[in-house]
Amino acid sequence: MAVAARMGLQPGLTVQEIGRGPDVDDQFRASVAEAVGSELVDENYGDVVDVVLLWWRDDDGDLVDALVDAITLLADQGVVWLLTPKAGRNGHVDAEDIAEAAPTAGLQQTSAVNAADHWQGTRLVAPKASRR
């Protein structure tokens, strides 16, 4: 639960999970659900969310498109946590790719966490100037 706290996850937040596959870290997912006090909602959820957990691998397609889709239901002060395999792991995403994709999708990178054994998290938010 320490990672969830470092990610700013707290009770009452609605967390949407996108890109879940058989390779995700279930212990991390459980700690997120415990931190917010509810189950994670999936990509078919139709209401506003506070946080998006986007599991992303290098061969998943176009990262810009995925980020644009991820922010569709995101609250004004919401956060996208882009979860990518760590360096040396299958599906690793280069930091440069994230740095290029985020601003194109209207987001800025603010911090990173060691989310799980095989996954790193990159915090993406809307730039302050564009927040309502």
Image (tube, rainbow, N blue to C red):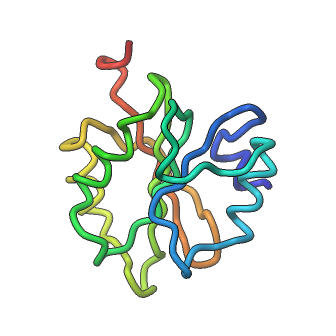
Q: Residue furthest top?
A: 132
Residue at image point 48% right, 37% down: 46
- Residue 117 location, x and y as percent? 64, 77
Q: Is residue 56 above or below residue 131?
A: below
**Closer-to-camera residue (18/96):** 18
Q: Is residue 23 above or below residue 77?
A: below
**Closer-to-camera residue (12/9):** 12
- Residue 109 location, x and y as percent? 37, 44
Taking 118 as reference, is 87 left or right? left
Quick one: quadrant of the N terminus?
A: bottom right
Quick one: quadrant of the C terminus?
A: top left
- Residue 57 location, x and y as percent? 37, 73
Q: To which quarter of the image does residue 119 belong?
A: bottom right
Q: Give the total of numbered labels.
A: 0
Taking 73 as reference, is 58 left or right? left
Taking 58 as reference, is 50 left or right? right
**Closer-to-camera residue (70/120):** 70
Taking 18 as reference, is 5 left or right? right
Q: Is residue 2 above or below residue 95?
A: above
Residue at image point 48% right, 27% down: 75
Q: To which quarter of the image does residue 92 belong?
A: bottom left
Residue at image point 60% right, 44% down: 15
